[in-house]
Image (tube, rainbow, N blue to C red):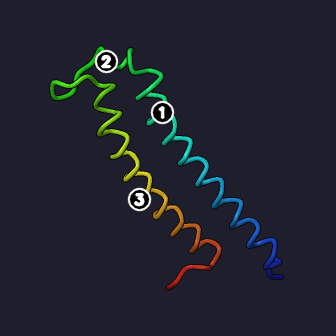
């Protein structure tokens, strides 16, 4: 017996939202937390002559954002294949 299409789409949407909120939480912790709240503790270390808090605020958060985009694309492609809604 096949799964109910409405329940299948609801599970797909729930997993999509869970993924989005998880990635946004990671981004917020790194960009806001490390670059704002924990900057004094991180400034004890240096990367390329710059304080680590400064580096994370100006470079690390942007690079993490790009990595999170790639993770989202990869995870959504897997989710699409699992729920048979992929384009292939």
At horizontal 16% and vertical 29% (from top left) the residue drawn is 48
Q: Alpha-carbon neighbours of circle 1 within 10 Å: few (<14), some, or many (≥20)?
A: some
Q: Nearer the viewer, mark 1 or mark 3?
A: 1
Q: Which mark is residue 80?
A: none
Q: Position of residue 74 (x, y in %)?
A: 46, 63
Relative height, residue 1 to residue 52 (above, below): below
Q: Residue at x 33, y 39 (%)?
A: 60
Q: Position of residue 9 (x, y in %)?
A: 74, 72
Which of the two discs, 1 and 3, labels the residue nearer the N terminus?
1
| Residue receiving disc 3 | 70
Q: Is residue 68 above or below residue 56?
A: below
Q: Distance from label 1 to label 2 (Cα)?
A: 15 Å
The residue wearing badge 2 is 43
State the SS at label 1: helix
Q: Compared to 19, does 60 lie above or below?
A: above
Q: Are marks 1 and 2 in contact (CB under 8 Å)?
A: no
Quick one: label 2 or label 3, which is nearer the N terminus? 2
Residue in view at x 21 percent, y 27 percent: 47
Q: Give residue 32's mark.
A: 1
Q: Is residue 70 left or right of residue 84?
A: left
State the SS at label 3: helix
Q: Earlier in the sequence, mark 1 or mark 2?
A: 1
Which residue is at the far left?
Answer: 49
Residues tagged 1 and 3 counted as in contact (Cβ below 8 A)? no
**Percent position (x, y) of residue 14?**
71, 60
Count neighbours of disc 3 (C-alpha within 10 A) and say few if under 14, some if 14 to 19, many if 20 or more.
Answer: few
Q: Residue 26 location in percent, x, y?
A: 51, 41
């Amino acid at each position: 017996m096949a799964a109910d299409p409405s329940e299948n789409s609801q599970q797909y949407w729930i997993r999509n939202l869970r993924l989005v909120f998880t990635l946004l939480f990671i981004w917020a912790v790194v960009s806001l937390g490390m670059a704002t709240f924990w900057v004094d503790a991180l400034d004890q270390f240096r990367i390329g002559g710059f304080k680590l808090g400064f580096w994370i605020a100006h470079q690390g958060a942007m690079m993490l954002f790009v990595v999170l985009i790639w993770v989202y694309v990869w995870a959504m492609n897997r989710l699409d294949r699992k729920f048979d809604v992929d384009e292939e």
